[in-house]
Image (tube, rainbow, N blue to C red):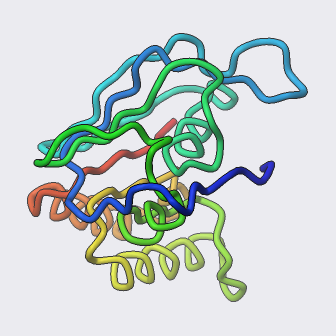
Amino acid sequence: LKEKNNNPQGLKLGDPVKKIVFNNVFFHYTQQKDWTINNYSRSFETDKINYLIGKNGTGKSTMFYLLLGMLTPQKGEIIIYTDKGGYNLEELNLNHWRESNISYCSHQTLVKEGSTGQKQLANIGKILTEKVNSSLWLFDESDNALDKENQENFNQQIDNLVKSGKLVIRIKH
């Protein structure tokens, strides 16, 4: 991904995220002429697991990159709501946003030892223990190689995050 301005002088959001709203968001990668995200509007809230479901190449992971502040929409806005109000993602100090507010768990992992499922399980365990104070949890097909028993345990952990007031967005096929 192309480096972007992390807005170091931006607002350091310290309050828990309660809702995220994508308002008419458009995005395409520079090498493409077609929109990857085309006039997308949706609210993500804390009282449930928010799913992004679709085929490969439909922009699900790109939406996470937009939410992480790694990419910027060409049009539209992403609004982050806390109990104190709403903030445009572009107003935030994006390094602080990622480090202090977000837990991101991908199907790709930096764990080197073990099978794909073992690596994913280790990655999930690490994220769940090291980022407990995050209020926004992003899971990008992070359990797709787990066996049935570990998937059930993972689903229970996600349910517990939701019950504790965390905002959870999960990509599934």
Q: How many marks?
A: 0
Please identify the quarter of the rendering in which residue 66 is found. Answer: top right
Q: Is residue 107 left or right of residue 112?
A: left
Q: Position of residue 155 (x, y in %)?
A: 28, 59
Q: Position of residue 149 (x, y in %)?
A: 34, 68
Please identify the quarter of the rendering in which residue 56 is found. Answer: top right
Residue reaching furthest to the bottom: 113
Residue reaching furthest to the right: 31
Residue in the image at 56% along x and 79% along y: 118
Q: Is residue 41 left or right of residue 112?
A: left
Residue in the image at 65% along x and 82% along y: 111
32 vs 145, nearest the viewer: 32
Residue in the image at 66% along x and 85% along y: 114
Q: Tell me if residue 59 comes above or below residue 103 in the rendering.
A: above
172 vs 22, nearest the viewer: 22
Q: Position of residue 31 (x, y in %)?
A: 90, 27
Q: Tell me if residue 123 comes above or below residue 95 in the rendering.
A: below
Q: Is residue 94 left or right of residue 102?
A: right
Residue in the image at 44% along x and 51% along y: 92
Q: Position of residue 20 (x, y in %)?
A: 31, 37
Q: Is residue 86 left or right of residue 147?
A: left
Q: Tell me if residue 133 comes above or below residue 64 in the rendering.
A: below
